[in-house]
Image (cartoon, rainbow, N blue to C red):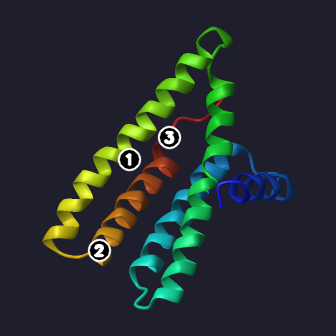
């Protein structure tokens, strides 16, 4: 999925003439929906299919995200910003894992998937209405 996602999002962007900024506004809504689809699975086969689809959508974020990052920063600080981006991404994943382990322990995994879906949906709505326009 790590290879297919960026290729797919690039091809879709070419076919639809969707700029990376537009892609990054649409993908979180699809990702949020994917979280709810994964949460609703009760057997292993459909769960694995839904989870693989979710991983596909997650892998689609990198290409447009890095395109915007590279377009918005100057050459002299590009590698530093890419390192910070990577660090924040990994750090956010680690913090999220600890935070959602509390939810899983208190309730269940389905609730954790739903909470993640709601959080992503809130950020997606914020991104559509309040995000700064790219240059």
Secondary element at image label 3? loop
Task: Give the residue furthest to the right.
Answer: 15
Q: Which mark is residue 111?
A: none
- Of callouts 1 and 2, which one flags the residue occurring earlier in the amino acid sequence? 1
Please rate how many residues cluster around mark 3, counting C-alpha atoms within 10 Å: few if below 14, some from 14 to 19, many from 20: few
If the image is split into quadrants, where does the N terminus sit? bottom right
Task: Give the residue furthest to the front.
Answer: 44
Foreground tag (1 vs 3): 1
In the picture, measured across the screen, residue 14 lies left or right of residue 41, that is right
- Of callouts 1 and 3, which one flags the residue occurring earlier in the amino acid sequence? 1
**Residue at the spot x=13%, y=70% of the render?**
106
- Of callouts 2 and 3, which one flags the residue occurring earlier in the amino acid sequence? 2
If the image is split into quadrants, where does the C terminus sit? top right
In the picture, measured across the screen, residue 32 lies left or right of residue 107, that is right
Residue assigned mark 3: 131
**Residue 19 percent across, percent down from the top left:** 74, 45
Q: CA distance from mark 1 to mark 3?
A: 22 Å
**Whether residue 12 is situated above or below residue 90 in the rendered picture:** below
**Residue at the spot x=56%, y=57% of the render?**
58
**Whether residue 76 is situated above or below residue 115 in the rendered picture:** above
Q: CA distance from mark 2 to mark 3?
A: 31 Å
Q: Which mark is residue 109?
A: 2
In the picture, measured across the screen, residue 102 lies left or right of residue 50, that is left
Q: Which mark is residue 93?
A: 1
């Amino acid at each position: 999925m790590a290879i297919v996602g960026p290729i797919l999002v690039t091809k879709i962007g070419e076919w639809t003439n969707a700029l990376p900024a537009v892609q990054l506004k649409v993908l979180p809504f699809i990702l949020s929906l994917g979280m709810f689809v994964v949460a609703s699975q009760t057997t292993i086969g459909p769960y694995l299919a839904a989870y693989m689809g979710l991983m596909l959508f997650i892998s689609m974020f990198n290409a447009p995200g890095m395109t915007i990052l590279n377009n918005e920063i100057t050459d002299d600080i590009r590698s530093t910003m890419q390192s910070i981006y990577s660090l924040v991404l990994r750090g956010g994943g680690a913090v999220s894992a600890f935070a959602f382990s509390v939810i899983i322990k208190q309730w269940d995994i389905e609730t954790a998937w739903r909470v993640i879906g709601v959080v992503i949906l809130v950020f997606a709505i914020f991104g559509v209405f309040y995000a700064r326009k790219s240059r």
